[in-house]
Amino acid sequence: MKGRHALVAGVDSSTQSCKIAIRDLETGVIIRQGRAPHPGGTEVDPENWWEALQAAIAEAGGLNDVVAISISGQQHGMVLLDLNGEVIRPALLWNDTRSAGAAADLIAEFGAEELARRTGSVPVASFTSTKLRWLRDAEPEHAVRVAAVALPHDWLTWRFLGYGPKHASRLGPVLAALTTDRSDASGTGYWDGVTGRYDTELFVKALGHDAIRPVVLAPQEHAGLTPAGLIVAAGCGDNAGAALGLGVTSGDVVVSIGTSGTVFAVTDAPSGDATGTVAGFADASGLSLPLVATLNAARVMGSVAELLGVDNQSAGELALMAEPGAGGVVLVPYFAGERTPNLPNSMASVHGLTISSATRPNLARAAIEGMLSGLAAGLDALRAVGVRENRVLLTGGAAQNLAVQVIASQVFDASVIVPKPGEYVAAGAAVQAAWALTGTRPDWPVEVVAAPKRDYRPLIRAQYALYSTK
């Protein structure tokens, strides 16, 4: 199995789609790939994820020659199972904000400092615990049926091993066979990364009664074997998968510009932030992953580009025609509410428009400056809990836009590099599969395609700070 032709697979079951990358064990080189879409919305029937996984595997040419696989997935999503292994209701995804009131209730009952101490994080609407509390209060007829609570990657791993509802599975609804990893468990709001245990009191306070939670596996552990002998690794949350795929080490801060935005680092010691800005997650290697998330990232560029009647590339070209600071125009990019700062009911706004400043280039630049300023505030929050960066790794599709790279060098007071575009969550899952197979974490190279000259312009952040928390 350890020969140079052995293949491992990594899956990224994200909000938008399911991607699979099959890689050479020794080199990490992608041999083949597959992809299938997921439905839109903030609540989804998990069966759609299962069908997309099968379609992505088929597009990638199947798994007959693959020896190990790992499934990563979007964090926080609430998958509810009854005693028969049936999904009780559509899964609420991380970006569903209806549980904002439930988060406030939990904080009021326990206190922000106590929750940060016990779980590393103060819950917001994206966390699983708040969704369970919302369920208890809004849909008690569903809450009372809950026999097990899983996350998206947990449920997919369980199904992949042959478990599931009686009518659709090989092994039946063995709820005790549910597994997860420490990275995804740390995003639930009821798991303690210091002790490595679930906090049953917090879980029961959220749901209203106890239920099965997945067994938390170590990074290199197996979740099980398929009948064909395929090793299935523990899996992980999407951000932890990206950290593995990028080979993030101490001193690296990742700024990921997807539909949503994340700013995270890998640290030796766990962090707790009673303000709730930094989530004290665990990573997928046995360390910690302090993280700041925003709901608005690449969608900001897309929305403003559409308003201007151009594509993202042309919007970037327009932005580079304007001066840093966009002539005083500031766009606060809360198009979908916001998680950081915790303003779930907020809206986007534009400030500083005058006869002279109201130009297409200024608006295009203000969109990018606003998007990146929100993420730079995330870096400030990481620094406040002790993170010290040597460089910022700018990732995600928007990071390949020249204007985003140039403006990032002006917004972040740190060195910025841009890794080669890639599906780094799936790459990280493949790393995990290789680790489970061999017992050793592989060190696959990551290529850097851009390193813009450092050109920090404090004016941009200063203007943004005037309006971003109002």
Image (spheres, rainbow, N blue to C red):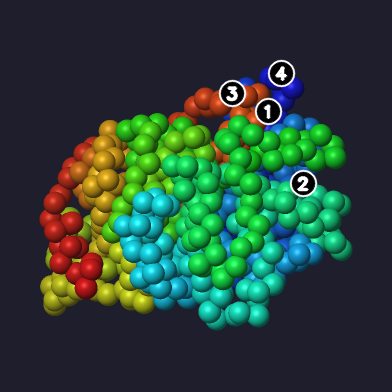
User: In the image, residue 450 lies at what x, y percent?
Assistant: 36, 37
Q: CA distance from mark 3 to mark 4?
A: 14 Å
Residue 166 appears in view? yes
Give the numbered dot on residue 3. Answer: 4
In the image, taking residue 460 as reference, residue 208 lies left or right, namely: right
In the depicted view, which residue is nearer to us: 448 or 389? 389
The residue type indicated by label 2 comes to Leu
**Which residue ends up furthest to the front in the rendered image?**
201
In the image, taking residue 214 as reference, residue 194 lies left or right, namely: left
Circle 3 sits on which residue? 440
The residue type indicated by label 1 comes to Leu
Give the numbered dot on residue 437. Answer: 1
User: Residue at the location (14% across, 59% down)?
Assistant: 462
The residue type indicated by label 3 comes to Thr
In the depicted view, which residue is nearer to us: 15 or 156? 156
User: In the image, residue 220 lies at what x, y percent?
Assistant: 61, 32
Residue 300 appears in view? no
Q: Quadrant of the N terminus?
A: top right
Image: 175 above or below 270: below
User: In the image, residue 59 lies at what x, y percent?
Assistant: 74, 48
Q: CA distance from mark 1 to mark 4?
A: 12 Å
